[in-house]
Image (cartoon, rainbow, N blue to C red):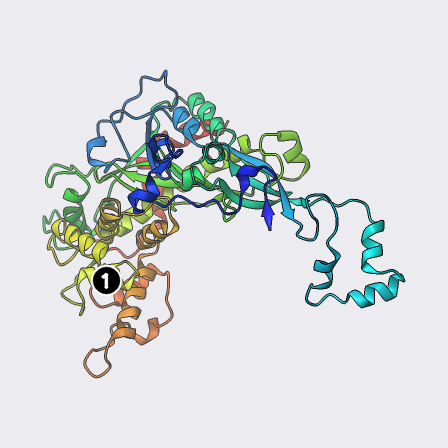
């Protein structure tokens, strides 16, 4: 059994339960006669930290389009700076490990009777092979220690909780037992390089939020860059050259449906479309299950919704020496300062792809009057629990025109908003991230998601009373947007894909100056 050599590392220490724990568990006596104090009064097991600006000296403020009062706590008028948030994150320490040796007493003498009683150990064979009795062997051996040092593993601990444990508070302080090759990448080492990089490009108005749990052992942090702002404009309708003002085509209806959803008043948008900010999400885990990672994100200020997974996921294993550039290059690894530049480059590279996905999602709608299930059932078919599905469905209907025919953009954004407002667990948890990825999939691969929901409906349907909805030729799920036109209830009759010409026009028209800004960051 692994244990720290110090008395404070007793393996019988009890953990402190989460916010649902009883009052007795939350508030423990420091001593029999001392004051009542709870561990969570001293350290937060789970917390959301808002930031605005890079350093305390920045006179940063949220953009006019962002209202922190509507963010459910992840943004705040009293936000810290990015640098202060990073300094609030814990420092992990590496401790030595020892195992109890029950065959050796505190005086160093070996208990040969205990050795003879070990099941599966043939002590007679040992004596025959050595020509000595077990007792003689033990007498001639060097003095043993009742604690055996473990040389191929290390104890990854939180010194703050170790200190509280030492003072008598019953709290565990270990995040994991790692191999001797494990390299702790501290939050300050991982994230402070981003301050200089963003200052270099003048992006001192960056804002966002950090969710952590397990006393900071797991972190997911979102960084929004207001200067990476663009407005996605629907392409001109090629069939509208005769001046017909009819709004019967799908692209026109999609714009009207999404005007209210994205904060643009109907009739006043002047073709401006939806405004989004670029940024990145990043995280780490001291508990051994993940690496340091980052990936681009989009932020929709009108709905306070973050769309994750919009680009390549970059990760760095906890090995080597993260802050020693020469050491990392010698071992074919990218130093962490340079590692961030690859992520910023990816935000630039994803511009055309993201713009195209948003345009497409606003041009494709599902008419739920033409399918045998409601909007909330559509969400549940994709794996979303009922209470979130119902909230998202109500919101989608409220912003759809008609209410029974929301766009893909509406459906995914409504789901994100519902999760943010109703999810009571940790926003740093894998469960929350999994629900969020359902919305990501809707935006990035709408054909796949719609077919998946239809296939799930068909699996649940009673063959005697319900007709199959997914055409036989689409029983194998496809990512091809062209397949949407043949699916019942999907309204995509004027735009099922964007041509290369459209995509190029979008990139040049709405992203002017963006590449130059990102180049300055990478350099």
Quarter of the rendering containing residue 121 = bottom right
**Left or right, 196 with reference to 262:** right
Residue in front for this viewpoint, 346 or 425:
425
Going 30% across and 55% down the picture, which residue do you hit?
Answer: 442
Going 34% across and 33% down the picture, which residue do you hit?
Answer: 37
Going 20% across and 65% down the picture, which residue do you hit?
Answer: 489
**Left or right, 103 with reference to 363:** right
Task: Give SS at disc 1.
Answer: helix
Residue in front for this viewpoint, 131 or 210:
131
Which residue, given by chain and number where applicable, does mark 1 sit on? Answer: 378
Going 68% across and 66% down the picture, which residue do you hit?
Answer: 119
Count of all numbered marks drawn on residues in the image: 1
Reply above or below: 149 against 441.
above
Q: Position of residue 309 (x, y in %)?
A: 39, 46
Residue in front for this viewpoint, 325 or 264:
325
Q: Position of residue 157 (x, y in %)?
A: 52, 38
């Amino acid at each position: 059994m692994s244990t720290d050599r110090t008395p404070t590392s007793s393996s019988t220490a009890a953990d402190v339960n989460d916010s649902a724990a009883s009052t007795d568990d939350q508030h423990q006596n420091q001593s029999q006669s001392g004051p009542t104090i709870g561990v969570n009064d001293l350290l937060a097991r789970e917390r959301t930290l808002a930031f605005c600006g890079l350093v305390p000296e920045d006179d940063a403020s949220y953009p006019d389009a962002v209202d922190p009062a509507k963010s459910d706590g992840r943004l705040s008028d009293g936000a810290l700076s990015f640098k202060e948030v990073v300094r609030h994150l814990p420092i992990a320490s590496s401790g030595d490990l020892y195992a109890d040796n029950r065959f050796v007493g505190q005086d160093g003498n070996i208990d040969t009777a205990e050795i003879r009683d070990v099941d599966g150990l043939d002590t007679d064979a040992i004596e025959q092979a050595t020509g000595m009795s077990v007792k003689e062997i033990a007498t001639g051996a060097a003095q043993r220690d009742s604690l055996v040092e473990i040389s191929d593993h290390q104890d990854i601990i939180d010194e703050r909780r170790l200190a509280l444990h030492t003072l008598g508070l019953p709290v565990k302080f270990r995040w994991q037992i790692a191999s001797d090759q494990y390299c702790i990448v501290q939050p300050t080492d991982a994230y402070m390089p981003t301050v200089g990089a963003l200052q270099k490009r003048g992006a001192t108005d960056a804002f966002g939020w950090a969710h952590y749990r397990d006393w900071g052992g797991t972190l997911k942090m979102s960084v929004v860059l207001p200067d990476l702002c663009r407005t996605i404009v629907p392409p001109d309708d090629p069939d509208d050259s005769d001046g017909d003002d009819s709004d019967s085509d799908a692209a026109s209806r999609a714009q009207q449906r999404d005007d209210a959803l994205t904060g643009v008043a109907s009739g006043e948008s002047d073709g401006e479309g939806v405004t989004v900010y670029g940024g990145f999400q990043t995280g780490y885990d001291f508990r051994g299950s993940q690496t340091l990672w980052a990936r681009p994100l989009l932020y929709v200020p009108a709905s306070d919704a973050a769309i994750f997974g919009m680009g390549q996921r970059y990760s760095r294993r906890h090995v080597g020496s993260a802050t020693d550039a020469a050491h990392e290059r010698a071992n074919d690894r990218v130093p962490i300062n340079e590692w961030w530049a690859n992520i910023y480059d990816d935000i630039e590279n994803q511009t055309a792809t993201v713009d195209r996905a948003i345009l497409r999602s606003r041009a494709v709608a599902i008419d739920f009057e033409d399918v045998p299930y409601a909007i909330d059932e559509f969400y549940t078919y994709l794996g979303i629990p009922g209470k979130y599905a119902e909230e998202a469905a109500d919101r989608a209907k409220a912003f759809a025109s008609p209410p029974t025919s929301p766009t893909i953009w509406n459906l995914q954004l409504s789901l994100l908003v519902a999760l943010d407002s109703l999810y009571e667990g940790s926003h740093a948890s894998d469960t929350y991230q999994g629900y969020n990825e359902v919305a990501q999939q809707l935006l990035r691969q709408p054909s796949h998601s719609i077919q998946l929901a239809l296939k799930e409906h068909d699996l649940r349907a009673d063959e005697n009373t319900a007709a199959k909805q997914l055409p036989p030729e689409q029983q194998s799920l496809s990512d091809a947007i062209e397949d949407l036109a043949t699916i019942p209830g999907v309204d995509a009759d004027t735009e099922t894909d964007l041509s290369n010409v459209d995509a190029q026009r979008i990139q040049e028209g709405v992203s002017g100056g963006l590449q130059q800004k990102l180049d300055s960051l990478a350099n």
